[in-house]
């Protein structure tokens, strides 16, 4: 019987499970949704037990197509910055604030004043943010002292699911960047900073590499999921880092370009190089780090424009049996690079890196009577590409440079958008074969952990194939240089006005 690997992806709106063969081909997949609770302003929380129930359902559905005897290992990736308190019996003590929760803003401000941002940055390589895990732990201590006292450990999303499968408490290295007491250079807990922050070190699980087999599926978990008892389970890692692995990004300079609802990039490095305007984390691959940047207005900006302004494209697509996005591409293709001076700022819900401005606003600049809907479609695509370039150029200030960009997410289905990104950034854009790169990355962790692959290099060579590469056009790059300068100047000029809104 041929061996398979199971990858589990714990997202914000759903969990996904996918089974892969040794060549990285998807054999079966399933998805189960769940919701986000927002009981008060700044709150965004989920019940980890709902994740577990969804995972059990998804695996059960998947195993109707895959023999559980063939599964050689399980890998798990998960959303960032969870803070799941479990007691000594493994019970979840409260819902976890998720990555968009900002209830700990006041705690962050106090820590910046008491300890200083430079001290925090010198250890973890990231500015303190209320969305991160550590402020949430301190919020428990102050606002839910009974939870803080009863907690045995604070877990991340993937380590919680690994615990439910194996009964083993752990924390992988790639999720450490949400805790300021995690030494990014030494990849260990900084106990001195724990004391300064007021975090009890006993709450922090033992750190393990993402591909480490931490345990095997218990009899109880087997009854609930359908997996065989004894199936090996890897520690897993951050979803963005697993997606980076699933795109084949494991060597310095290689970069994953995120083309999902949000946009961004993860640049692989062989040294710990921080930048205050970007996010630094350990890769799921040993001896590698990721310098990451993200924009809120990735594929979501195009989706917003389609929903609000592209009824004609939807009707045409229904008649022709295509999709609205295909029709939008076709129209935008006819517009010259640079959209004849129309420039879009994709700051549709504030903006993340590199400007970190929650009050930033989306802007169209350069409208006149000659502009058509096709101009606006192309300008939206170009604006997202400009935000990608802004993050890449910011990374260069740390002395690191991107080479080929491997794109993942739905935007990779648009040849026009891939070419625009190549021309704007001056970087080749490669399109891997897998549409499930994140779950594949999680599965590969298990594959390396159980010895199916002797190295990450072998794992990538055997599973990640490039379907197409888009090369930058120097002439179009020169046109986009002008648009990019306008893009940067628009934000600089409008920022004071945006802060008033």
Image (cartoon, rainbow, N blue to C red):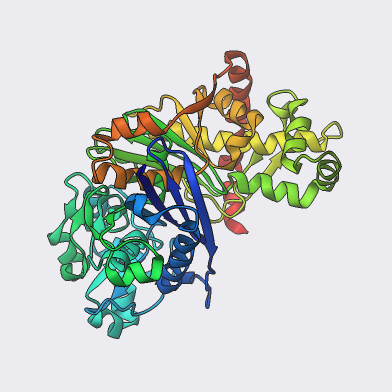
Quadrant of residue 152 within the rendered picture = bottom left
Q: Please state which of residues 479 and 29 is positioned toward the viewer in this rendering.
A: 29
Q: Please state which of residues 135 and 227 is positioned toward the viewer in this rendering.
A: 227
Expressed as whole percent of the image width and height from the top left, the position of residue 310 reads: 80, 46
Expressed as whole percent of the image width and height from the top left, the position of residue 273 reads: 28, 37
Q: Is residue 334 left or right of residue 154?
A: right
Q: Of all residues shown, which one is farthest toward the left?
A: 192
Q: Of all residues shown, which one is farthest toward the bottom?
A: 146
Is there any visible trace of residue 21 in the rendered image?
Answer: yes
Quadrant in the picture for the C terminus: bottom right
Q: Please state which of residues 98 and 396 is positioned toward the viewer in this rendering.
A: 98
Expressed as whole percent of the image width and height from the top left, the position of residue 264 reads: 49, 41
Q: Please state which of residues 288 and 106 is positioned toward the viewer in this rendering.
A: 288
Quadrant of residue 217 within the rendered picture = bottom left
In this rendering, the count of numbered labels is: 0
Quadrant in the picture for the N terminus: top left
Q: Is residue 240 left or right of residue 169?
A: right
Quadrant of residue 359 within the rendered picture = bottom right
Q: Of all residues shown, which one is farthest toward the front?
A: 1
Expressed as whole percent of the image width and height from the top left, the position of residue 370 reads: 85, 31
Residue at image x 24%, y 71%?
Answer: 153
Q: Is residue 281 left or right of residue 264?
A: left
| Vertical order, 122 against 367 (above or below) | below
Is there any visible trace of residue 183 in the rendered image?
Answer: no
């Amino acid at each position: 019987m041929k061996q398979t690997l199971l990858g589990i992806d714990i997202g914000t709106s759903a969990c996904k499970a996918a089974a892969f063969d040794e060549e990285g081909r998807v054999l079966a997949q399933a998805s189960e949704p769940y919701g986000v609770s927002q009981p008060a302003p700044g709150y965004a929380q989920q019940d980890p037990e709902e994740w577990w129930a969804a995972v059990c359902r998804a695996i059960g559905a998947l195993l109707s197509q895959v023999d559980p005897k063939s599964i050689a290992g399980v890998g798990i990736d998960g959303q960032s910055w969870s803070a799941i308190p479990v007691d000594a019996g493994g019970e979840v003590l409260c819902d976890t604030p998720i990555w968009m929760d900002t209830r700990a803003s006041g705690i962050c401000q106090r820590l910046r004043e008491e300890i200083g941002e430079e001290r925090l940055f010198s250890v973890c390589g990231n500015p303190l943010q209320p969305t991160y895990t550590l402020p949430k732990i301190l919020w428990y201590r102050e606002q839910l002292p009974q939870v803080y006292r009863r907690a045995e450990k604070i877990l991340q999303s993937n380590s919680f699911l690994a615990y439910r499968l194996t009964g083993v408490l752990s924390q992988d290295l790639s999720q450490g960047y949400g805790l300021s007491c995690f030494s990014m250079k030494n990849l260990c807990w900084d106990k001195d900073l724990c004391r300064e922050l007021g975090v009890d070190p006993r709450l922090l699980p033992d750190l393990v590499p993402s591909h480490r087999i931490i345990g095997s599926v218990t009899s109880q978990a087997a009854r609930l999921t359908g997996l065989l008892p004894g199936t090996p389970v890897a520690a897993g890692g951050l979803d963005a880092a697993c997606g980076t692995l699933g795109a084949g990004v494991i060597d310095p300079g290689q970069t994953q370009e995120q083309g999902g609802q949000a946009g961004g990039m993860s640049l692989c490095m062989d040294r710990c190089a921080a930048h205050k305007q970007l996010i630094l984390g350990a890769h799921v691959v040993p001896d590698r780090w990721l310098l990451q940047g993200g924009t809120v207005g990735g594929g979501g900006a195009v989706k917003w424009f389609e929903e609000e302004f592209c009824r004609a494209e939807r009707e045409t697509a229904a008649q022709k049996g295509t999709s609205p996005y295909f029709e939008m591409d076709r129209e935008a293709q006819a517009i010259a690079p640079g959209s004849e001076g129309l420039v879009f700022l994709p700051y549709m819900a504030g903006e993340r890196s590199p400007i970190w401005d929650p009050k930033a606003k989306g802007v169209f600049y350069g409208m006149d009577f000659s502009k058509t809907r096709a101009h606006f479609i192309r300008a939206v695509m170009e604006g997202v590409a400009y935000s990608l370039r802004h993050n890449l150029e910011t990374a260069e200030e740390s002395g690191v440079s991107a080479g080929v960009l491997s794109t993942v997410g739905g935007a990779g289905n648009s040849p026009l958008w891939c070419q625009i990104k190549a021309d704007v950034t001056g970087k080749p854009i490669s399109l891997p074969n897998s549409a499930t790169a994140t779950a594949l990355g999680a599965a590969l962790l298990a594959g390396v952990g159980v010895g199916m692959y002797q190295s990450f290099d072998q794992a990538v060579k055997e599973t990640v194939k490039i379907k197409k590469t888009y090369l930058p056009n120097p002439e179009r790059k020169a046109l986009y240089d002008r648009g990019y300068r306008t893009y940067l100047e628009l934000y600089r000029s409008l920022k004071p006005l945006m802060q008033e809104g």
